[in-house]
Amino acid sequence: MWKSAEFGYDGKGVQVVRIEQDIAQIPDGPCLAEELIDFEKEIAVIVARNSQGEVKTYPLVAMDFHPTANLVEYVVSPAPLENAIHQKAEQLALEVAEKMDIIGLLAVEMFLTKSGDILINEVAPRPHNSGHQTIESNYTDQFEQHIRAILDLPLGSSASKCCGIMINLIGEANHTGPVVYQGLKEALAIEGVYAHIYGKAETRPFRKMGHMTIVDADLEKAYKKAKQIKSMIKVISA
């Protein structure tokens, strides 16, 4: 994996190098080279911690990625994985937050390898894409929890009220200009569907423009609705 040493985000500044010819596509500048991990699933745990040492963790989530844009398409909560993986990932995230002496939120992204190991991929000391579904699916969402933590208030319950799936709304390929959310009205007619539009006036290919949350008591039903909504909504230009 080639990674730019600065200004990288959401797949920007990241490229897989599989053959020698791929090197020609890499821009000049400081960079990192990392071993490509053959992982089964990318997962994440968000930890909240205040100055008194009180901590809360949000349920483990699993992420599905866009095959070419290297952007998260779905965040699934709770992750449909064995309980032992949930416990191991949560403990690892807690250890990282304690060692960093974090105050506020820390999103700990991890790789679950095909052999069952869990490797830390990235940390983000802020509200994070892997926690957007908490607005609708958890008793205390990640944004309120962050404020509670940095103001040293008692932390709220991070438990789930229901299953939640987040879908990133990203600009369609070959569309640049004033944004149009095609199919949004039809999607919002479905029970348990919520829209969060980020207010960006113009779209461009793979630009993150908002997200949808789908909630349901049953994870399988939520995922089925998420797939339906993903096919309905297109972020295009006028």
Image (cartoon, helix red, strand yellow):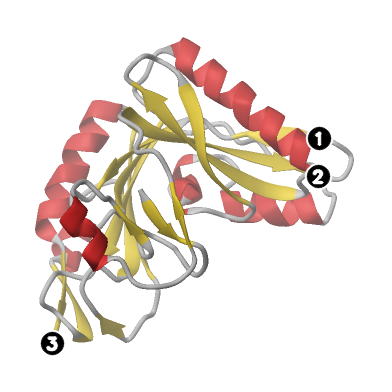
Residue depicted at x 23% and y 27%: 220
Q: Name the residue under label 3.
A: 238
Q: In this view, does 234 lie to the left or right of 9?
A: left
Q: Which amino acid does label 1 sit on?
A: Glu
Q: Which of 232 and 51 is in front in this view?
A: 51
Q: Is residue 172 above or below residue 124?
A: below
Residue depicted at x 36% and y 65%: 12
Q: What residue type is labelled 3?
A: Ala
Q: Mark 1 points at which residue?
A: 54
Instruction: Report the Cα–Cα distance between label 3 and label 1.
Output: 49 Å
Residue 231 is tagged as none
Q: Which of marks 3 and 1 is nearer the N terminus?
A: 1
Q: Mark 2 points at which residue?
A: 50
Is residue 62 among what the camera can see?
yes
C-beta proximity under 8 Å, tags 3 and 1: no
* Residue 23 horizontal/vertical position (percent): 26, 60
- The quarter holding residue 187 reads bottom left
Q: Is residue 84 above or below residue 92?
A: above
Q: Earlier in the sequence, mark 2 or mark 3?
A: 2
Mark 3 is surrounded, within 10 Å at the Cα level, by few (under 14), some (14 to 19) or many (20 or more) other residues, namely: few
Q: What element carries label 1?
A: loop
C-beta proximity under 8 Å, tags 2 and 1: yes
Mark 1 is surrounded, within 10 Å at the Cα level, by few (under 14), some (14 to 19) or many (20 or more) other residues, namely: some
Image quadrant holding the C terminus, namely bottom left
Q: Is residue 117 above or below residue 126?
A: above
Q: What element carries label 3?
A: loop
Residue depicted at x 63% and y 22%: 91
C-beta proximity under 8 Å, tags 2 and 3: no
Q: What element carries label 2?
A: loop
